[in-house]
Image: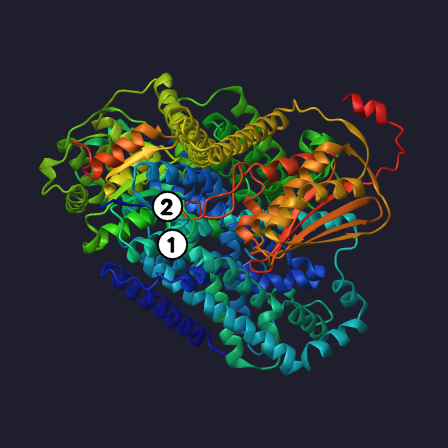
Amino acid sequence: MSKRILIVDDEPNIVVSLEFLMKREGFEVAVAADGEAALRAIEENRPDLVLLDIMLPKKNGFEVCQTIRANPAWQSIKVVMLTAKGRDTEVAKGTALGADAYMTKPFSTKDLIAQVRQMLGLDG
Amino acid sequence: MLQGWVIASVSFAYLGVLFAIAYYGDKRADAGRSIIANPTIYALSLAVYCTTWTFYGSVGRAATTGIGFLPIYLGPTLMAGLWWYVMLKIIRISKANRITSIADFVSSRYGKSQLLGGLVTIIAVVGIVPYISLQLKAVSNSFTILLNFPDIVMPAKAGAQPLLQDSALYIAMILAAFTILFGTRHLDATERHEGMVAAIAFESLVKLLAFLAVGIFVTFGIYDGFGDIFDRAELVPRLKALMTVADTGASYGSWWSLTFLSMLSIMFLPRQFQIAVVENVNERHLARAIWLFPLYLLLINIFVLPIAVGGILHFPDGGVDADTFVLTLPMVERQEALALFVFIGGLSAATGMVIVETIALSTMVCNDLVMPVLLRWKALRLQEEQDLSGLLLAIRRWAIAGILLLGYVYFRAAGEAYALVSIGLISFAAVAQFAPAIIGGIYWKGGTRAGAIAGLAAGFAVWIYTLLLPSFAKSGWLPLGFIEEGLFGVALLRPQQLFGLAGLDEISHSLFWSMLANIGGYVAVSLRRRPDVVETGQATVFVDVFRHTEGSASSRFWRGSAQVQDLLPLIGRFLGPERARASFLAYARRRKLSSIDELQADADLVHYAEALLAGAIGGASARVMVASVVKEEPLGRDEVMNILDEASQVRAYSRQLEQKSRELEAATAELRAANERLKELDRMKDDFMSTVTHELRTPLTSIRAFSEILLEDPNVEPGQRAKFVAIIVKETERLTRLINQVLDMAKIESGNAEWHTVEVDLREVIEESVAATSSLFGDKRIGLDMSIEGGAPKVMADRDRLIQVMLNLLSNAVKFCEEARGHVTVRLSAANDAVRVDVEDNGPGISEQDQRTIFEKFRQVGDTMTAKPQGTGLGLPISRQIIEHFGGRLWVESSPGQGAKFSFTLPLNREGGMHQEERAEK
């Protein structure tokens, strides 16, 4: 059974690229353009991993991450934060809120794919 | 018919009452429950100023000079206004230095000079004797007149009666005995006499009531009120003249000089000094005296003119001395009781004056004249005497008797030549001589002992020559030719027209020359030499009294070694051994020591001992006595100067410190503000960097992702490949735009931007911008209205820049409008000298707070954590810079929920393109 990935980002072009990359790896892909839509999507169909942007309309990535971690049923969901803001404080904040990994935009597509695969336990 | 024995026994009964009050006052004072610790009693006791001279003499003077009696009371009233400055300072100095008399004050100020103390004492005694004789004359006359009740018989001339039948002699003796009982029952280190003050305050009330009683009787009893009296006076030419103020230059002059003279007298008459300064219990009592004392003077003067007029109307032939009107008016109306009351009032005025004056003078005579001589008189071996307190009391008692005797002698000699007021004024002129040395002494540090001696001696000599000797001459003691032809027949030396100065009354004349000599001598001699060590020390203690804390100041100027075993017996000899031990013990207790033995004989103790002694024998003598048991190491001038310098440096330094600390605080506040501003700027820069970084990274993310996809995967189907490449191109454009904007802003900021200023048609600019953004509007389905008024206004500007501004405003409007429901209106209008453009949307609006910040660089509306900002936050700042560059204004009007209206104005081009080329070059 293929893994489900939820892509949360409000930049359409970035979503297009991520969707293409994840589908190419054979994952099932869902997309949300803001924080609230992201939480709705998780409730409807629980993903295995969320690619989460931080600067989102309505509810930012930190809040979404916090909500995920607050729900016992969602503990197994992996969260990879993707952000254009690369400051150390934000990395630390994301990690503290329960993100499993943190990647700074622009990222290497190879690294991103490797990271996602590793977290889903597909390599090794 | 009033029998002599009735008058005498009533008088003695009255004196008995006074004595009882005084006795009670002293008892209460010893018990520590003072009855005079009361500002009203203090103010009343100051009314000792009003003697028989006031009581009888004011009417006498009013009868001859009309309101000419007033300056004597105007002066003190004026002076009372200055008390808070001058008197307070004198009181403070006197308390701090245990000063017991005016002579003590002057001698202490000028280095505790015995010579000066003696000189002041002599001036005071000689000057005051006529004044005392005046009291004797008044009491004696009123007694004699009353004795003939109800007949009005003027008393015989003073000195005409045989000595032993002269009532004045007996009055002098009674007063002397009474004063001795009052004032010298025991010796007090502070020279305070609480019981006496209480009695004086009582007397002040009695004399006021007596005078008011006569006034009311004459005004409302004999006549029909003030109006009636003055109406009648109008009919008599002599009286009419009295009612007018001085009418010649000379009389104006004498008004001034009398006012001035009495201003000084209220301060420097020994009895005023005694009551106001020495007997003062509490500085704050002065505050009430400042208004209550002038009020007293006003009350006691209200009826002066009515009585004078009444007297003249009653005794038109001049057979009755106007000085006696107060008494003779009730008598002629056969008011026995009132006449007796008046006599008691007059007696009050006389006894009050005589008691206080002679006590003050006897203290001075004892401390500043007799003791210094006796202590130097080696043959007397006083230095070895064990208890001198008895001797001190004896000296004072003899001094009191002696002074009254002198008063009587003057009365016999000169009493008849002058009216009461004139005799008083002679005394006033004498004590006025103290003014330069005292006033100068408390405000000018440069005054020296030699200066004070010179001034006092010169002023006193002039006073003797121009006032005292003429008064003797007029009494027949000296040939009258002395007055009329001058000394040795030299006209210039005529004592009442000295150096040809004529046209002044004798008092003004004497005052002028004596003050000239006094002040001149004081200042000139003082300036010849710098004050020496002791003088400088005392000058500082006096002049800077408000700056020093109690006691510590004087002892700083002393250095030496002493033994408690030497000091204690010394003090004991003058105060009595028990009082001395008690005082030392009290001093020790204040220092938290349990016994006298633990006391260190340091500078403070020596100073304390000297102050104790000063209370008993005066400052100058005390200094000599203490010096005899203390091995004093004199301070050199340099050392004193150092102490003074140090003090002033410390003051200056602390002022500087205060100043610096204020400056520092201000600087700190500025720094803090600057720091806040910097932090704010730093935060803004951080935000901007973060925003710019974000804006750069976002397109870069897409570009990199698609580039890698295309690079690694050649099998991407052509349709997708084309889409990906298109995205890359679009994102690259976005990046370029951003970078351009940042650079543009930087250029404008640094002033390096290029401006192509030409005449621009704003309508074209708007149309072009709208056309350029039509796709934006189309995409979001946002409506657009245009309203162009006033033809095609021309402005001088850079066309492309204006399009940039319009594009920015339009795209902002679109950005914040809701899709499909949004609507934007562009309006162009021309006013007198400006053209205005509005771009209005129906979006969410901008809060007032944000309206202020959106024009700041790097600021964007909205919480950056929840809403991703669109754009760089540079569009509006750049637009504003552009509009302002062309002399216009860009602003926003909005309220949340009501949309936003961005407007700008530009000045209309009226110059018709004259300077187009020139401007284009810039």
Q: Is residue B505 left or right of residue B302?
A: right
Badge 2 sits on which subunit? A
Q: Secondary structure at mark 1?
A: helix
| Residue B324 image position (x, y, % from top left) | 60, 67
Looking at the image, which is closer to me, B430 or A21? A21
Mark 1 nearby-residue class (10 Å; few <14, some 14–19, many ≥20): some
Under mark 2, the amino acid is Val
Under mark 1, the amino acid is Ala
Looking at the image, which is closer to me, B434 or B429? B434
| Residue B210 image position (x, y, % from top left) | 52, 72
Residue marked by disc 2: A8
Q: Check if mark 2's residue and mark 1's residue have beta carbons within 8 Å.
A: yes
Q: Is residue B355 left or right of residue B23?
A: right
| Residue B865 image position (x, y, % from top left) | 40, 45
Q: Is residue B922 left or right of residue B78?
A: right
- Tell me the residue at 50%/80% (across/down): B337
Looking at the image, which is closer to me, B551 or B616? B551
Q: CA distance from mark 2 to mark 1?
A: 9 Å
- Tell me the residue at 81%/67% (across/down): B237
Residue marked by disc 1: A37
Q: Is residue B278 left or right of residue B215?
A: left
